[in-house]
Image (cartoon, rainbow, N blue to C red):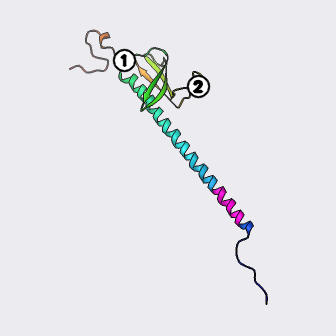
Amino acid sequence: MIQGRQKGFTLVEILVALMVLAFAAILLADTIGSGAVAHSRLDETTRAWGVASDKLVELQVYQRWPNVGVQDEIVERHDERWMVRTKVSNGPYADTRRVDIEVGPEPASAKERLVTWSVFSLLGKPFDAGASTGGSPAPGGNTP
């Protein structure tokens, strides 16, 4: 009578299967971690965009003619402190200013500065009603 071999897995096959499973688990954990970091970074960028947009809208709505130069300020939004750097330079056209706004988290030291979001725009010189003379209509305007 011939005896048959027992059916089952060998120790080597089990070890190889465990190694493949461990490798897959490590890759999955790394992918989930990368996704969490990317989500956090995107969230921070979105908040910085909001701070930069607020500053630009402030300059547009209040219609103040900004002086050429650089201004740094700390702004608090939603319990976070942001460093906002506003650079104003002469624009490419008469009576315009170029405004560059850089936003990043408040730096821990003077040497550390991280820019999370930046935006630029052109501002036109606000109309000064007191500067017009004689009550004549603006060019191209209709008279009643």
Which image quarter: residue 36? Answer: top right
For label 1, the residue is: 126
Instruction: Name the spot of residue 73 as percent of width and height, x first.
Output: 47, 21
Which amino acid, by three-letter code, is at mark 1? Pro
Which image quarter: residue 2? Answer: bottom right
Instruction: Name the spot of residue 43 as percent of width and height, x first.
Output: 48, 39
Quadrant that contains the N terminus:
bottom right
Query: Element under label 2?
Result: loop
Q: Residue at x 55, y 46 (%)?
A: 35
Q: Residue at x 66, y 56 (%)?
A: 23
Instruction: Find the distance from the CA under tag 2 to the CA under tag 1.
Output: 36 Å
- Label 2 or label 1, whichever lies nearer to me, is 2
For label 2, the residue is: 112
Looking at the image, residue 45 lies above or below residue 122: below
> Is tag 2's residue or tag 1's residue first in the polypeptide sequence?
2
Q: Residue at x 51, y 43 (%)?
A: 39
Majority secondary structure of magenta residues: helix
Out of 5 and 43, give the one closest to the viewer: 5
Out of 7 and 126, give the one closest to the viewer: 7
Q: What segment is highlighted magenta in the picture? A: 14-24
